[in-house]
Image (cartoon, rainbow, N blue to C red):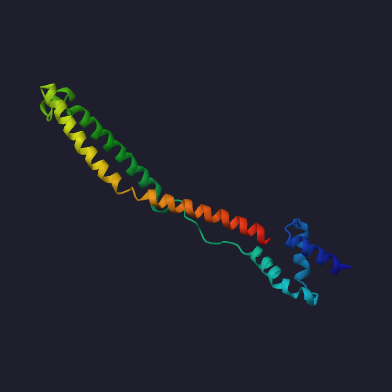
Amino acid sequence: MVLNSIEKLLEKYENGETSLHEEQQLKNYFSQETVAPHLEMYKPMFAYFVVNQQEQFTKDLPLNPDGYRDKKVFTYKWMAVAAVAVLMLGYYFKTPAVSSYQEYAYGTYDNPEDALNEVTKQLAMISAHFNKGISTVNYLDGLKKGTETLDYLNEIEKGTSIIFK
C-alpha cells in the first residue's frame, strides 16, 4: 500500500504536480535505508535534495567595497559639470551664422544662366553614370526567362505526379 502511494507520488513529481507536503513525503521515504529495489535510482537524487537544503552561505558580503559606488557618483557629477562648462563656452564664443555664411559662400553664381548651364552639365554627367549602371543589370531579363521555363517544368511535374498517383 505504501509502495503504491510512493509510486503515484513519483509519477506526480515527474509531471511537476506535487505539493511541498508530498515532496517531503518522498524525501522521507528515500532517506530510509530500505527502499524498493526498482526505486533505488531515485534515492541519490532525493538524498542530494536533503543535503542541499541544509547548506548555508556563511561568507560576509561587503555591501560597499571601498566606496566604489561613491567614487562612481562623484566622477559622474564632475563629468556633468564639465559638459555644461563646454556647452556654455561654445555658446559664448560662437560667431553669428549669417556673417560666417557670407564669408565662406563659395560656388555661387551671379548670373542665373551660368548656374543653369552648370546644373544641366552635372545632371547630364549623373545621367550618363546612371545609364551605365543600368546597362550592367540587363542580364536579369534572361534570368527571368529562365525562371518562366522552370515554372512550365513545375506544371508538367504536377501533371505527371497526378497521373502516377
Q: Give me the residue at 11% from left, 26% from top.
A: 114
Q: Quadrant of residue 129?
A: top left
Return the residue nearer the eye: 54 or 121. Answer: 121
Q: Quadrant of the N terminus?
A: bottom right
Return the residue nearer the eye: 131 or 7. Answer: 131
Return the residue nearer the eye: 161 or 48. Answer: 161
Q: Give the number of callouts.
A: 0
Q: Quadrant of the C terminus?
A: bottom right
Residue 25 visible (yes or no): no
Q: Position of residue 117 (x, y in %)?
A: 14, 28
Horizontal side of 61 relative to 72 (left or right) equals right
Horizontal side of 31 relative to 110 (left or right) equals right
Q: Position of residue 116 (x, y in %)?
A: 16, 26
Q: Give me the residue at 18% from left, 28% from top.
A: 94
Q: Give me the residue at 55% from left, 55% from top.
A: 154
Horizontal side of 52 relative to 90 (left or right) equals right
Return the residue nearer the eye: 134 or 85. Answer: 134
Rendered position, 8 above or below 38? above
Horizontal side of 156 relative to 91 (left or right) equals right
Q: Position of residue 14 (x, y in %)?
A: 73, 62
Q: Give me the residue at 66% from left, 69% from top.
A: 48
Q: Position of residue 79 (x, y in %)?
A: 30, 40
Residue 60 visible (yes or no): yes
